[in-house]
Image (cartoon, grey):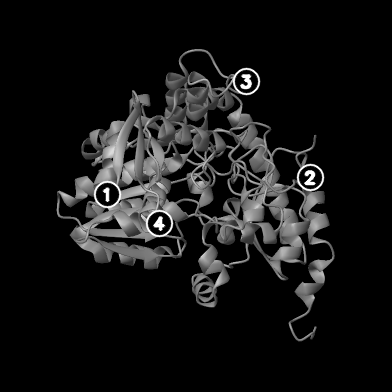
């Protein structure tokens, strides 16, 4: 079956209970999802794992509640005592941790405490530390609540060593300096905590966010920095001179500069070399997330102290593993401060998730190359389409070539702005529509509505986004490995003759 088609609401791809993308085929469905509409929520048996609790996890959680005779309680299953203690310390009174398996805990609280539930839910989401669907599946089978795990290809023994070696080669460090984490957000959290602790000990209190960060990365900076710490944001990642002035202004108080390179969703590529020179001279740490274009295409670690990345994208290109990684630059002056601290804060992945990742990584490089080649061609096509107002693509940046690996493309992600309304194009587009990117199949997402619904739907929020150069109605596209002519046809059909909007203003004047 072709992957370039319309998917019913809630359908997952691939056909696996561990798929991380569920279809939200229309803007009405997107709004219903954001607003918790029963019609939409009932259709989603799973979804992006940090945002939608998998049915396996729901079933297993209910089992432990019943077994422990805990009535009128709610909670989350968290692997690892260290992570649970971290959550308890941050959340404060009201939560209780119950050990339900050798390394698994049920973090629970009264069911009628709605505000507390929301705090715990968001904390678990931001840190990316919940139990995975594969671990839940195995435990359901162990307790007689399931027949057998979903069959899937996975490698022989040695998956962790193979993944660490591959990532070390791709990022430019030693395998001992790579940490495989339960999710990309968990990698970011571990890096954040390590840097915060190390720099606070030196009296460094100023953090700088460059560009628009992914939702949970921004939330971690907002919510987890201490009261004596200052956070400054510089939204234009390509305005190098102004950015360097901001960094210089922090002086010896500079703790860390955090940047996605390329950024999400505008796919901006910063002048990372100059930024790192300035940050390093001032004694700060540069934390870089290259997920949008991947470690397969970009070589950022020589120009950073550490990198974090989601391996759910590109590496796990079949779209059925939630996992991430952190890598340290051994030449960084902060290496000694960070190497032990990062390992103290990260959560390792579940064994079967790591096994599945190792299997998919065997063909990831080839798949990423095809995604990037297709993305370059689709970007060129969309630039010429009269319905498309703007195309954002990493390969177009003057700084991309400085960071790209030999022969690399610009990654799979393209973001477009339209001359006309979003809904007709989005609803008509015959590809899988939902969160995530970097998969072998094409995905489209109304990114701001999925990640920042309040901003995208309120007048003040929309005005703010536009003031920093973000169109709330943009579409983020992750180009897959399908034949490029078929991909172009899917977009041509959705864009249709709506190019007339590009030639007519709102009053009808040409």
Residue placed under numbered mark 4 in the picture? 114
Numbered circle sitting on residue 207: none
- Residue 129 visible within the image: no
Whether tag 2 and tag 1 are in contact, CB under 8 A, the answer is no
Q: Secondary structure at mark 3?
A: loop
Closest to the camera, between mark 4 and mark 2, is: 4
Q: Nearer the viewer, residue 468 or 121?
A: 121
175 in relation to 37, above or below: above
Residue placed under numbered mark 2 in the picture? 5
How many angstroms separate mark 1 from mark 3 (CA)? Answer: 38 Å
Query: Residue 193's spot in the image, x, y percent?
Result: 28, 45
Q: Earlier in the sequence, mark 3 or mark 4?
A: 4
219 in relation to 46, above or below: below
How many angstroms separate mark 3 from mark 4 (CA)? Answer: 38 Å
Residue at (70, 43) in percent of width and height: 374
Query: Residue 141's spot in the image, x, y percent?
Result: 52, 21
Q: Earlier in the sequence, mark 2 or mark 1?
A: 2
Whether tag 3 and tag 4 are in contact, CB under 8 A, the answer is no
């Amino acid at each position: 079956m072709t992957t370039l088609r319309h998917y019913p609401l809630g359908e997952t791809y691939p056909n696996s209970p561990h798929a991380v993308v569920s279809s939200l085929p229309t803007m009405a469905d997107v709004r219903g999802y954001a607003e918790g509409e029963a019609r939409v929520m009932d259709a989603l048996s799973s979804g992006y794992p940090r945002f939608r609790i998998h049915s396996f996890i729901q079933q297993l959680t209910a089992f432990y509640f019943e077994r422990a005779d805990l009535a009128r309680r709610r909670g989350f299953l968290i692997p690892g005592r260290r992570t649970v203690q971290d959550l308890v310390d941050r959340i404060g009174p009201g939560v209780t941790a119950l050990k339900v398996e050798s390394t698994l805990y049920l973090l629970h609280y009264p069911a009628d405490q709605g505000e507390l539930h929301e705090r715990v839910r968001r904390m678990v989401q931001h840190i990316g530390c919940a139990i995975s669907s594969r671990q839940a599946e195995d435990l359901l089978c162990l307790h007689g609540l399931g027949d057998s795990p979903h069959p899937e290809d996975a490698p022989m023994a040695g998956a962790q060593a193979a993944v660490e070696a591959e990532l070390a080669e791709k990022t430019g460090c030693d395998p001992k300096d790579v940490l495989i984490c339960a999710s990309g957000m968990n990698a970011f959290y571990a890096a954040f905590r390590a840097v915060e602790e190390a720099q606070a000990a030196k009296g460094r209190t100023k953090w700088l966010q460059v560009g628009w960060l992914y939702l949970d990365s921004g939330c971690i900076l907002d919510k987890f920095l201490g009261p004596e710490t200052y956070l400054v944001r510089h939204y234009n990642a390509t305005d190098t001179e102004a950015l360097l002035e901001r960094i210089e202004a922090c002086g010896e108080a500079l703790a860390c500069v955090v940047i996605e390179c390329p950024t999400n969703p505008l796919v901006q590529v910063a002048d990372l070399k100059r930024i790192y020179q300035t940050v390093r001279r001032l004694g700060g740490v540069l934390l870089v997330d290259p997920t949008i274009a991947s470690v397969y295409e970009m070589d950022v670690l020589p120009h950073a102290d550490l990198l974090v990345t989601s391996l759910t994208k590109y590496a796990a290109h079949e779209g059925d593993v939630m996992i991430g990684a952190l890598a340290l630059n051994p030449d960084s002056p902060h290496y000694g401060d960070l190497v032990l601290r990062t390992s103290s804060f990260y959560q390792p992945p579940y064994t079967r998730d790591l096994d599945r990742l190792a299997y998919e990584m065997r063909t990831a490089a080839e798949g990423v190359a095809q995604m990037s080649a297709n993305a370059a061609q689709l970007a060129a096509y969309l630039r010429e389409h009269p319905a498309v107002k703007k195309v954002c693509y990493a390969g177009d940046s003057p700084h991309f070539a400085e960071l790209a690996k030999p022969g690399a493309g610009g990654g799979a992600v393209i973001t477009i702005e339209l001359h006309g309304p979003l809904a007709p194009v989005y609803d008509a587009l015959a590809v899988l529509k939902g969160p995530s990117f970097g998969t072998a199949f094409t995905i489209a997402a109304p990114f701001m509505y999925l990640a920042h619904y309040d901003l995208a739907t309120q007048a003040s929020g929309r005005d703010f986004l536009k003031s920093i150069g973000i169109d709330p109605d943009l579409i983020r596209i992750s180009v897959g490995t399908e034949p490029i002519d078929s991909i172009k046809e899917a977009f041509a059909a959705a864009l249709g003759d709506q190019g007339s909007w590009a030639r007519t203003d709102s009053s009808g004047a040409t």
